[in-house]
Image (spheres, rainbow, N blue to C red):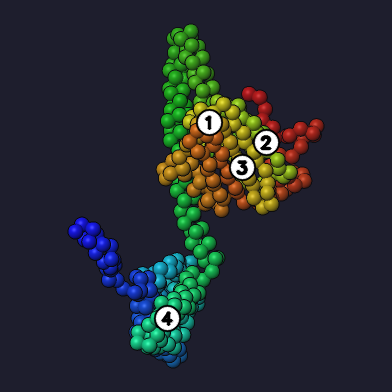
Amino acid sequence: MNTTSEARRSTAPAALPPPRFALDGVTWKEIGYLLLNLPASIVGFVYVVVMISVGLGLSVTVVGLPLLAFGLVGCRALGRLERGRARDLLGVSVDEPRPLRTRTFGFLPWLWATLKDPVAWRHALYFAIRLPWGILTFVLMAVSFFLLWPVLPFLSRGLTTVDRAMVRGLLQPSDELERRIAELESDRGVVVDHAAADLRRIERDLHDGAQARLVALAMDLGLAREKLLEDPEAAAKMVGEAHGEVKVALQELRDLARGIHPAILTDRGLDAALSSVATRCTVPVAVTVDLRARPAEAIEGIAYFTVSELLQNVSKHSQARSASVDVWRAEDRLMIQVRDDGRGGADVSGGSGLAGLGERLRSVDGLFVVSSPVGGPTMVTAELPWRDREFRRAPGGQGGVPGGAPGPGPRGGRSGAPGRR
């Protein structure tokens, strides 16, 4: 009996899979997009034809050009809706064109900028040529539901490929230059924020450091002057203490000036300046600078402070035994590479010092890459655009020197070299 039951179970047909649609979700979205092409194309075509005909027809009057300008603004709005439809149904992600901006305020500057807006005119062209295509896709989809069902997925994919090309060609930002402008506008905000933060830091350092010491020094010298006749010995002691305060205040001012722009960088360039920074690091640092010429002052300053901050991180966090700094030029880029054999695990997430350093470099069209696996080693690569240093004529009729750097003195030395204090 058991054998017969097992035989019956073995010959029973397998359970059927649950029923499902023959077309997947992506194909259904593409079919929906193609069916919606007709109403969307009719609306866009009618709007563009009426807008252009009325605007150009009344251009001989006062209201013609303003009506045309407002019509172009509406083309931008319709283009935004089309990009949303393509994003939701076709998965096409297209960047939004940057908003229309004018250098001066007023109705006439806005009118002129709108009338020559290439983004709005491309959107108008998109809707003008879409009506025949919308009719064709709607008819093909409607017929395919009844006669061409087996090839419907392939047909919908081919037609939506053309739609994707139209959206990318006419509804995205005009070209790489426009996207680059948008990036630079964003980077300009980063630069302004960092500049404001640096000014606040300098103001705080002056207020809490040298300024406070100079105020105390002025008070001590005032008391010493009052005691000069009554108690010369006490006055002399107070003057000696004030002399010590002067030295401390001068040292703080030197440190602050080094943080703004070190004199050694101006006088002797990156090689000497980075070697000076390396001596203040807590681990031995090998510095190699292979530059036949000096870059522009701004690029040179950014390179200096980048290496300085990276070596500070090495001193504070790496627990390394040695480090190295390499600087060289590769075509039109200034390359910087800082390595250390520390514990690794450098965090470049938002809010960290490395993230802020990367933002500063990217704001000047630079590149910042960190490779720091846990356990080390850590290697940070930075790139900056190379710009040649401009030659300026030194005062007094001397020959041109790069970037205003001091020229050679009468005995071959640098006339601008700092003297001993």
| Contact, mark 3 vs mark 2 (Cβ under 8 Å) | no
Point 43% across, 23% down: residue: 216
Report which residue position mark 4 lands on: 151
What is the quadrant of the N terminus in the image? bottom left
Report the disc number at residue 336.
3
Which quadrant would the C terminus be assigned to in this image? top right
Position in image of residue 257 (x %, y %): 55, 34
Foreground disc of the pair 1, 2: 1
Q: CA distance from mark 1 to mark 2?
A: 20 Å
Q: Which residue is mark 1?
A: 342
Which mark sits nearer the N-terminus, 1 or 2? Answer: 2
- Between tags 4 and 2, which lies in front? 4
Q: Earlier in the sequence, mark 3 or mark 2?
A: 2
In terms of secondary structure, where does tag 4 sit?
helix
Of labels 4 and 2, earlier in sequence is 4
Mark pair 1, 3: CA separation: 19 Å
